[in-house]
Amino acid sequence: SKVPSITLNNGVSMPQLGFGVWQVPDDEAAKAVGTAIEAGYRSIDTAAIYENEKGTGEAIAASGLPREELFVTTKLWNSEQGHDATLRAFDESLARLGLDYVDLYLIHWPVPSKDLYADTYKAFEKIYADGRAKAIGVSNFLPEHLERLLGETSVVPVLNQIELHPQFQQAEARAFHARHDIATEAWSPLGQGRGLLEVPTIVAVARKHGRTPAQVVLRWHLQLGNVVIPKSVTPSRIQENIDVFDFELDADDLAAFAALDEGRRLGPDPLTFGG
Ligand code: NAD
């Protein structure tokens, strides 16, 4: 494949770039995921709450690829937290995907007000022990939530999928993850395609390399060591977003990106969301 892999803390390989399908309707997901697989993507990021596990699964089946060549991630929604509810929700996700295992299962949000994420994670450990998820991890966890899991459970999450882009660089979270051998996966890596791709610094770096703003932003993530899962339903952009492995940003470019951090989220605050 054209996408290099990273090795997770349990020895499993994961492509460093994958395809995200948030906000892709179920009846368009099969087409979009099919286009991505054709373009060379081998990792797909869905979630129960995206309501497109069925379409995603259809594209996987239609691809004809051996199952082990694909890396499929899904996530447990907030309303299903708790030990037994988690086991049921996982079965339902597998059924909708039409798979007998996922590569990665994530707790979508910690929802600290419910205080169920540690119990939920213990159910994840069972799913992992049964081989029905090849790896388990979390999403939107703050260091304090990870600390608690590290203290109360035995399988270290392989990664934390968090909001991360040049205007919200998450230096502290990344350093915490690195200390614990937890990979950092960036959601909304392109800043949801809103203002980020018009920021003059990014446009200038893109022009310098003869690339698009989206491509240099993805390159920035990859050089930081992040796993990225850009989303698009436009075939030319799906292609463009994976064509990022034949050039490199230099130290000047990286310094210019470092100055773009505004420390401001686009999405919800994990401390209060879902409560
Ligand atoms: P993104 O940063 O990937 O941006 C996607 C948008 O950017 C597209 O809808 C399109 O408008 C634009 N875009 C994409 N490619 C482009 C290109 N080459 N040129 C110009 N514009 C382009 O945003 P996202 O979808 O929010 O995040 C990516 C994935 O992350 C999601 O699909 C989902 O899988 C995951 N995610 C997870 C969480 C979570 O809570 N765990 C939250 C949000 C997203």
Image (cartoon, helix red, strand yellow):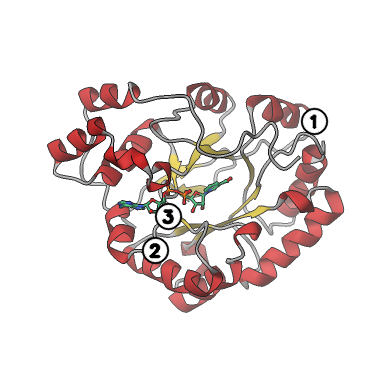
Check the image and report above or below for 57 versus 17: below
Secondary structure of the residue carrying tag 1 is: helix
Q: Where is residue 59 in the image (x, y as percent from the top left)?
A: 48, 73
Going 74% across and 39% down the picture, which residue do you hit?
111
**Mark 3–mark 2 contact, CB under 8 Å?**
yes
Residue drawn at (51%, 27%) of the image? 174
- On the image, numbered disc 2 is attached to which residue? 233
Q: Distance between the residues labelled 3 and 2?
A: 7 Å
**Is the residue marked 3 within 8 Å of ligand 1, measured from its CB?**
yes
Q: Can residue 107 be seen in this view?
A: yes
- Quadrant of the frame with the C terminus: top right
Instruction: Give the spatial CA distance, label 1 vs label 3.
Output: 34 Å
Q: Which of marks 1 and 3 is nearer the N terminus?
A: 1
Residue at the spot 75% in from the left edge and 27% down from the top edge: 148
Examine the rendering and report whether any part of residue 64 can be seen: no
The residue identified by callout 3 is 231
| Residue indicated by mark 1 | 152
Residue type pointed to by label 2: Val
Q: What residue type is labelled 3?
A: Lys
Splitting the image into 4 quarters, where does residue 1 fall? bottom left
Q: Is residue 19 found left or right of 2 in the rendered image?
A: right
